[in-house]
Amino acid sequence: MASSKIKTIGVLTSGGDAPGMNAAIRAVVRRGLSRGLKVKGILKGYDGLMEETIKDMRAADVSDTIERGGTVLYTARCAEMRTEEGVLKAVETCRKHGIEGLVVIGGDGSFRGAEKLANHGVNVVGLPGTIDLDIACTEYTIGFDTAVNTAMEAIDKVRDTSASHERCSIIEVMGRNAGYLALWCGIANGAEDILLPEKYDYDEQKIIDNIIENRRRGKAHHIIINAEGIGHSASMARRIEAATGIETRATILGHMQRGGSPTAKDRVYASIMGCMAVDLLMEGKTKRVVGYRHGAFQDFDINEALAMTKEISDYEVEIAASLSHNYNKYDQMNMSELITEE
Ligand code: F6P
């Protein structure tokens, strides 16, 4: 039974949904109940605290959810939570419903909201839920593994038709301002070019030269993975076709990357993180974010986590390029420097 002072916790999902969020919710609910806590599900992210759409969660409410994409609690991006008035309303709802501890599953924006609640006495723990992998304190975010596998399978399919028609294909993947999904897909799909917001120099002539060179070497297709943060795939395709004379098509994978049944990794990691969140709250901890770093699950102060930065690895970018035969882009780089930098 609970030895903590906290008797009731809440859980919500906020921001873009991500496969594995249900596994995390399930873990929070079942871990909480098994420790003698009351668990409340807040519907539609922070909107649920504005509108008081809150329900008591029983173990059965999360049955048959671990294998489902999306989030059974629904999600939203709540503009009101960015105002002081909204925060106070959320705090008041927590007080009214006896929610002393809150697990917030989402990205950096959601953690900022959580931090404000904590300043008003609600104990909070954040879990990193986003397909973008753009949370600095962690090397893993709930949903990334599934999203990258979903995109990889879709790109394999585009590649089949691209090769049959001897076309160039630009495939745009999500990631907001981060290039992690694009880099992983680029390596996993053996793309000829990978355009990352963190690295792209907007020199289209280099891409055009690569396409012409690849065609000269007898390659039937040319796959370019373009990150959402760069965008403009359709106009890029038109310019490339005009410059190379090679038919070029743009495919934007879009929201299909956010759906689907989570991979084993997303189910297991999200389950562990969900349990950790409950354990932290029961230990009386607040303003924490759970992350996975250097091979271990850890928790961080929420402000320190929000202040952290992380960068796409130059070494991995170079590896992706070298495996695609585009040596010309990277032959000026000093390899030993790249390796020791990481
Ligand atoms: O953060 C997840 C994400 O899918 C980003 O990759 C993308 O930029 C954004 O959400 C799209 O948001 P929305 O679903 O609101 O269009």
Image (tube, rainbow, N blue to C red):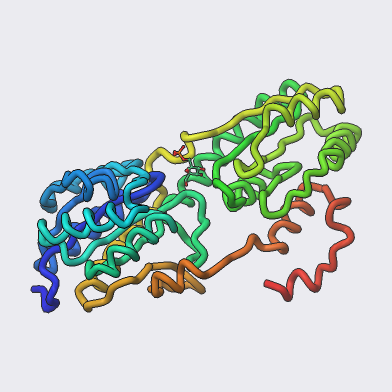
Tell me where residue 301 sits by quadrant. bottom left
Q: Residue at x 82, y 48 (%)?
A: 325
**Where residue 89 sits in the image (x, y, percent)?**
22, 54
Residue 128 visible to the viewer: yes
Query: Closest to the observer: 296 or 231?
Result: 231
Q: Which residue is drawn at 47% across and 35% down?
A: 255
Query: Closest to the observer: 171 or 125?
Result: 125
Q: Which residue is drawn at 64% across and 60% down?
A: 312
Q: In this view, does 184 lie above or below 121?
A: above
**Where residue 38 sits in the image (x, y, percent)?**
10, 61
**Where residue 282 sits in the image (x, y, percent)?**
19, 74
Q: In this view, does 153 lie above or below 37?
A: above
Tell me the quarter of the image containing the C terminus.
bottom right
Tell me the quarter of the image containing the N terminus.
bottom left
Residue 269 visible to the viewer: no
Q: In the image, 54: left or right of 114? A: left
**Where residue 238 sits in the image (x, y, percent)?**
76, 24
Query: Closest to the observer: 188 or 276?
Result: 276
Tell me where residue 332 sits by quadrant. bottom right
In this view, which residue lies farthest toward the front?
85
